Amino acid sequence: MFQYIIRRLMESVPTIIGASIVIFLAFSLAPGDVITANYTGGMNLTEERKAELRELYGLNKPLPERYGLWMGHVLQGDFGQSYLYNKPVTDVIKTFVWNSFLLSATVLVLQWMLALVIGVFSAVRQYSLFDSLVTVLVFVAMSLPSFFLGLLLLKLFAVDYRIFPLGGMTSTGVDYQGLQHILDVAYHMALPVLTLTLLSIGGTTRYFRMTMLEVVRQDYIRTARAKGLKERVVIFKHALRNALLPLITLFALELPGLFAGAIITERIFNWPGIGRVTLDGLYQRDYPLMMGFTLIIAFLTILANILADVLYGVADPRVRHR
Amino acid sequence: MRKRWYVLLSLVLVFSLTLVGCGSKPSSSPATENNAQQGDGGTDSTTPESSDQPETGYIKAKQPELVPEAAKKRTDTIVIGMDSPKGVFNPWFYKTAYDGYVVDMIFEGLGKVGKDGLVEPDLATWEMKNDNKTFIFHLDPNAKFSDGTPVTAEDAAFSFYIFLDPSYDGLTDMSIAKIVGADAYKNGNATTIEGIKVLDEHTLQVDVEEVNALTIRYLTVPVLPKHYYGKEFKKGDLSGVKKLNEQPLGSGPYVFEKFVPSQEVRLKANENYWRGNPPKVQNLIVKATNDETKLQMLQTGETDFEEGISVNRDNLDQIDAMGFLDRNMLLNNGYGYIALNHAHEPLNDRLVRQALMYGLNREEVVYAYSQGLAEVIDVPISKVSWAYPDEKDIIHYNYDPEKAKQLLDEAGWKLGNDGYRYKDGKKLTLHFTASSPNPVNDALVPIAKENYKDLGIDFIAEQLDFNAMVQKMEKGDYDMAFLAVSLTPDPDPSQHFHSNGADAKQVFHYSNPEVDKLIEAGIKELDQAKRKEIYQQLFKLLNEDVPYIVMYQRYNMNVISSRLKGFEGEITPFYNFVNALPNVEIVQY
């Protein structure tokens, strides 16, 4: 197993190099740069100054050299300076990514727990009233655009009935400590978490339902029932554990998303996450920030893939890695 | 039984989908600095509710007693809502307007821009000597930074060393000021700037190679404490200075307390403010808000003031309905225009350009885009600038297709059998490059297509991302494109209209010797009255020559809870609300 992990990690080196080239080219070949993005910013950017800035940022060098310089620094842990924030890219990412992580991780836990319960029940009672109702609700929630759902919840719970705050992560103008701080953040998180959970629960529920339906038709389930086991034991011990197998991959692949941020939801709820930051970065052509962040996400995705394969091997004795 | 369920379920589904369809509205385009056309999001061209000109200026709330409880509880704190500052709280390096507001609260400069857009003394007064090539700045001897240290000429001189540093990448281009020895310092080995001399603790001398009307704008630099920012300063390496961006220290009315990224900036009144009148309200919080919930923030009392609410009918109605909100609506110091590529036939012909101006129903376009909340303009300068020419001297290009046709005939473009115009066998075709998303283009393209077709012009529009459009324009691969520009307080239009201006040369390919002469004269002239005369002539000429199709000037709006008093009459398009803040009081109803 250990050898397998080492081998997979070695194999992913060329992948990450390839990814870095694609990321670099995608951003550098896209039309415009940070200087054109500031084109209408004012009337006082002369041609000489534009050239000077391009020289300063190294934007006038040939592409291979720029890539070499960038990669060289990245290998030393230096992702460069963000133009927009005027500080190192790693600092910008560090400032915002954990806020996004907190939000996404909470949503992930809720989403999977709820999806498990709902999915299993609707599979066990296929075509029942519960199943049909859940199916409809889940599809409705899935099909709502996030800005609509978010604004609707805000209007209901923050404007009409002022139960929850209108956005942000902490109360304005106060420094809570310890438990009070945790409660304050939880209070601010309620609506964005609700929004994101509602949006994401649909897909996962369908996966649970589908894999459960497949498993409950297997012979060994019939055998278990024939042995006279309680239905609860049959479903949760025999069926569910097998149904979970294909979902391991799905789960592992959702992990890099924890760090990617939810652009629209974060914006509507004024959540200080990385999603909004990257969107701004894209519009302002903040290359160092965008390239650094995308590279990190690419790296995490590759890791998650390896993790998915390893976990699958651990969980399913039929698949053994050597 | 099961079947019936399906029917019911599908009905529910369909119903819920319709609901969703009705409820969803287009999310407004992400506000970025480059989208100068931001705001005014709605392009809802429904029937006009009132065709009257909107009520501008400071409009007071009708029911001030309705201020929400949440806001009333804050007796010593003002909460200002605005798009999130990025945390670059440094006058040398900030890039967004929002960081700029925070900078204005904390820092002062040798001079500042006054209500009318002209430079006024701030930390210093100045005199000019030696054929106006030497500026002597006398700093106020009482001036102190918030840490108690005096503001000295040494501190002011330090600013020039930052602006002229070889690695400086901020927005100010100090080389324009032509300070003696600037080039030797910036691009050479000199360790000092020859033209910057500290005469004594409170006197600074700056020598320039040549002087013009803009010089003083560049020389009135922000003054930051050198003992604080200069600790890790080395020529060619500003990283030590930039490290302090999030811990600013200046001489202004407010002191910085805390920055929570993307959430809030907390400031306190500077109790030791050297002018002796610290701000009347103790605490000031800048809270990050977004377009979607700005108004709701005011409504629930989470903010007391909102820096920018898009001016559209919906928002105005909502503000008036809430009753307790004052609003201050002012013309934006900038305008929207359709750039023309003069390198392409037939746009180098003035008659054709005038025809394009007369032949486009600009009123209709601007109405469709703004619901009547923007003004159509005919001159490429803000209506509120002192350089704006007399209304009766300028040509008003009201929609007149007959006149446009006549001008095109005159220019030699004759109508062919297929309904299009031809000259020397060439069809009159114009390629319009439209950035997207952009509400102006959504309104403009269909109307222009129809109007120009009517004139016999084949108008072809293409949609692109903003940056892609700019790149295309720089390559000269376009005929027409819509852009918006924000102007500096000074009306000098060199960049756009002088043959050597960056945009005129690289993008518009516009050159008119007469215009050049007036622009040069306007910059050279130091006497304000004479300068005004020159610009009146210049803009009259530009009005006639149509270097591009000017479209409209929109509004900016501050919205203010009526519990705050002191903004009325204190804000102009050149002079933002931050100037008024220290004198603002909280009143209880």
Image (cartoon, coloured by chain):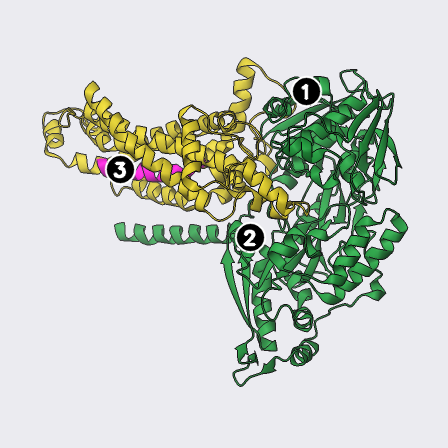
| Circle 1 SS class | loop
Q: Are marks 3 and 2 in contact (CB under 8 Å)?
A: no
Q: Of helix, strand and loop, which mostly describes the magenta segment?
A: helix
Which callout, 1 or 2, points to the residue nearer the camera? Answer: 1
Q: Are marks 1 and 2 in contact (CB under 8 Å)?
A: no
Q: Nearer the viewer, residue B27 or A224?
A: B27
| Circle 3 SS class | helix
Q: Which residues are magenta?
A: A196-211
Distance from the alpha carbon under mark 3 to that under mark 2:
50 Å
Question: Does residue B392 sit above or below A67 in this rendering?
Answer: below
Which color was chain B given?
Answer: green
Distance from the alpha carbon under mark 1 to that under mark 2:
38 Å
How many dots with numbers?
3
Say few, some or many: other residues with alpha carbon within 10 Å of mark 1 (under 14 / 14 to 19 / 20 or more).
Answer: some
Q: Which chain is yellow?
A: A
Q: Disc 3 is attached to a residue of which chain?
A: A
Look at label 3 and name its amino acid. Arg
Distance from the alpha carbon under mark 1 to that under mark 3:
65 Å
